[in-house]
């Protein structure tokens, strides 16, 4: 059995559900850095980093990650 704990310094964090979806509500408009982590990600340190813009037209955004 494995367990993972990820400590982040932000109120805007989420864990995916059983379908792989995460929801972060009430994020103020603005530009942000998005970091997605998974222990089996095919990326350095298991992290995918992206810029994210939240505005009145960004209701939902989809990000996909390939796993090993």
Image (spheres, rainbow, N blue to C red):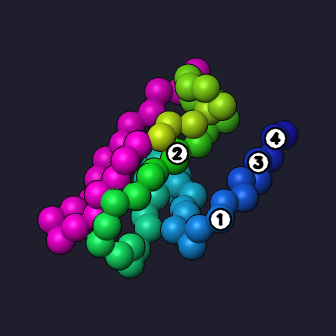
Residue 59 shows in the view: no
Mark 3–mark 2 distance (CA, rounded to whole Å) = 14 Å
Secondary structure of residue under mark 3 = loop
Which mark's residue is nearer the viewer, 4 or 1? 1
Circle 1 residue: 9
The magenta span reads 50-68
Q: Position of residue 51 (x, y in %)?
A: 37, 47
Secondary structure of residue under mark 2 = strand
Circle 4 residue: 2
In the image, 30 versus 22, the foreground residue is 30
Dot placed on the residue nearer the N-terminal end, 2 or 1: 1
Which mark's residue is nearer the viewer, 2 or 4? 2
> Are discs 3 and 4 less than 8 Å apart at CB?
yes
- Check if residue 31 falls in the magenta segment: no
Residue lying at the far left in this picture: please name it: 57
> Are discs 2 and 4 less than 8 Å apart at CB?
no
In the image, 8 versus 30, the foreground residue is 30
- Check if residue 54 falls in the magenta segment: yes
> Are discs 2 and 1 less than 8 Å apart at CB?
no
Residue 66 shows in the view: yes
Left or right: 40, with 63 as reference point: right
Q: Position of residue 38 (x, y in %)?
A: 61, 39
Q: Position of residue 23 (x, y in %)?
A: 43, 64
Does residue 6 sit above or below 14 in this rendering? above
Circle 3 residue: 4
């Amino acid at each position: 059995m494995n367990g993972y704990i990820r400590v982040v310094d932000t109120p805007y964090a989420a864990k995916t559900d059983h379908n792989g979806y995460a929801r972060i509500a009430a994020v103020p408009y603005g530009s942000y850095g998005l970091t997605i982590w998974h222990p089996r990600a095919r990326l350095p340190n298991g992290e995918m980093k992206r810029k994210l813009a939240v505005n009145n037209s960004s209701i939902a955004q989809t990000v996909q990650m390939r796993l090993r």
